Amino acid sequence: MVDALHEVHRVLAPGGVLIDARPDSRVPAYVERRSALRFQKFGVVRTNSVELGNDRASDRAIARVVRERLFRRKRHGRFWHRVPFESLPDLRHYLREHLRFVHRATWVVDETARRRHANDQFVIRRAVRFELLESQREVQAPRSFAASPGRRG
Amino acid sequence: MASHMADRIGRVGKHVPAMSSVLRPDPLHELGEWGGEGLVRRKRVLDLGCGDGRFALGIARLASRVDGLDPDNQAIAAAKKSARNSGRDNVRFAVGAAQQLPYPDGAFDVVLLSWTL
């Protein structure tokens, strides 16, 4: 991943921007039933452990190229995105084959409610995080050197 | 719109769940969340891990040029077909890996790692 980020830095013009956007596994996703007026929480969906590890590795790669002063963090944020499904069985089918999520939701409503509303419309509401990083063309001297007494005055 | 979307989701969710681009936010909505169209307007953009080109094509009318790169041959073939159908002449797609980018130094103003890293 660090190799890829070094390549990104190479192909970016000075002051160019890297946008890193991906699902935010630091917070769970939610299963919600869609009704005319609102969304009702039915369950929680977590990211599987392999993808959690991959996400942490990505975070470390970004942190490293910032430490190397190839990039400067400009802005970051998170937004929520709803993926719609025709029914609860469709949603469960999707989860069973999903590459990032665990394959079963943790339900916060009982089985009776799930059966009663099985043919209603559902969504998975998931978080997406993003960060904008500015390419730094000039690699500055390490702070300890720049601030050494011999360089003053 | 909602039923059309639900239909697409139903098919994709059942049959090709790994090909998730239609399950992602709309490109312009996503761009809006990141800071708005100014981020890519009249810029040279590289969409790294572009998949089937959904995002690259979604922003092509704003950018001066968009390149999409992905290691998946089939996804790139689909992206090229979509580009032809869109009639846009400022979008190019290629098969390749992020560790060895086939572009010269300083070729882009914006590089996007969207759901890739």
Image (cartoon, coloured by chain):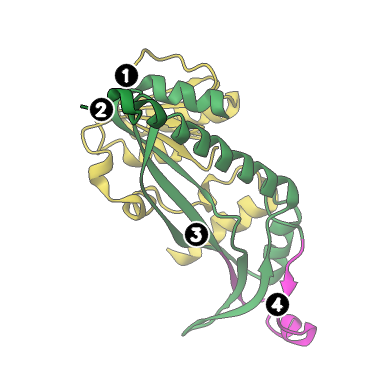
Chain identifier for the yellow-coloured part of the image:
B
The three-letter amino acid code for the residue at tag 1 is Gly
Residue B56 position, x and y percent, is 39, 36
The residue singled out by tag 1 in the image is B106
The numbered mark, 4 or 2, whose residue comes first in the sequence reads: 4
Q: Are marks 1 and 4 on the same chain?
A: no
Instruction: Give me the chain letter of mark 1.
Output: B
| Vertical side of B68 occupied by A122: above or below | below
Residue B103 position, x and y percent, is 40, 15
- Residue at image x 68%, y 82%? A117
**Cα distance between the residues tagged 4 and 2:** 72 Å
- Residue at image x 27%, y 38%? B40
The three-letter amino acid code for the residue at tag 2 is Arg
**Cα distance between the residues tagged 1 and 2:** 35 Å
Q: Secondary structure at mark 4?
A: loop
Instruction: Give me the chain letter of mark 3.
Output: B
| Vertical side of B47 occupied by B6: above or below | below
Comparing B12 with A17, the one in front is: A17
Residue A1 position, x and y percent, is 58, 30
The three-letter amino acid code for the residue at tag 4 is Ala
Chain identifier for the green-coloured part of the image:
A
Please tell me the numbered disc located at residue B5: 3
Q: Secondary structure at mark 3?
A: helix
Comparing A16 with A143, the one in front is: A143
